[in-house]
Amino acid sequence: MGYAQLIKADVPKSAMSCDHKVSMSDDLLNKVLKHRDSAFATCLSCTKGDCSMKTWPEEGRANETICQRLFCTPKKVNRGYEVPADTPRGKSTFSYTYSISKKGTLTDINILSVDGSYNRNDALKFLQSLTKKTQYEPLVYDNKKYQITNLTSSMSVNMMWVTD
C-alpha cells in the first residue's frame, strides 16, 4: 500500500498562494462571511465575473493573510483521497496555478513546473484526486457570483511503498 507525504514548497513572493489543504471551522466560516463584503475591494480586483487576489508588498503581509482567510481558504477539504493507481513512486515537486469557480470548487489547474518522478500529467491527476471534494464558500458580492482566477501553489510529494 502506498502513501503520500505532502510538504508545502516555496512559492514566489509575487504570487498569491493559498493553502487548499486546510479548511476552516464552521465558527470561523461564520466570521468570514460577516467580513467579506467590507474587504471585497481591499482584497480583490474584479472585472465582470472574474476576480484576482491583490498581492501585497512585504509591509502589507498582514493584509494579505486576512485576504487569504476571507477569500481563498476552503470550508471543506478531502480528508481521505485515493492516490491514482498509476502514480509513480519517489519524490516530486511541482508548482501550479488554479482558480476557485463561481460554485466554490477548485478548477482550472495548470501545472507550471515539475521536478522528480512525476511528469505534468501525473501531477495534474494527483492534484485532481486531492482536491476533488475541496469546497470554498462561493464568492457573492452585491448579489453577483465571482470566480477567483490568480491563485498559485506548489507542493512536494514523496510517494513511498509501505510494507507490514
Image: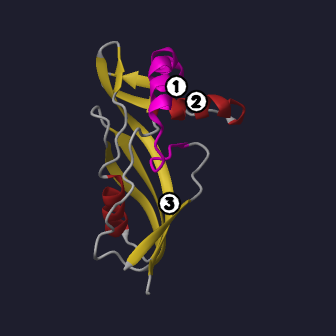
Circle 3 SS class? strand
| Residue type for callout 3 | Met
Quarter of the figure that contains the N terminus: bottom left
Residue contact between numbered discs 3 and 2, judged by CB atoms under 8 Å? no
Relative to 134, is 69 on the left or the right? Answer: right
Residue 18 within the magenta-colored segment of the rendering = yes
Q: Residues within 10 Å of mark 2 (few under 14, many from 20)?
A: some
Q: Which mark is residue 66?
A: 2
Q: Which sits earlier in the primary sequence, circle 3 or circle 2?
A: 2
Residue contact between numbered discs 2 and 1, judged by CB atoms under 8 Å? yes
Q: Which residue is mark 1?
A: 43
In front here: 105 or 117?
A: 105
| Residue type for callout 1 | Cys
Circle 2 SS class? helix
**Numbered disc in front, either 2 or 1:** 2
Q: Please give the range of residues in magenta.
A: 15-44
| Residue type for callout 2 | Ile
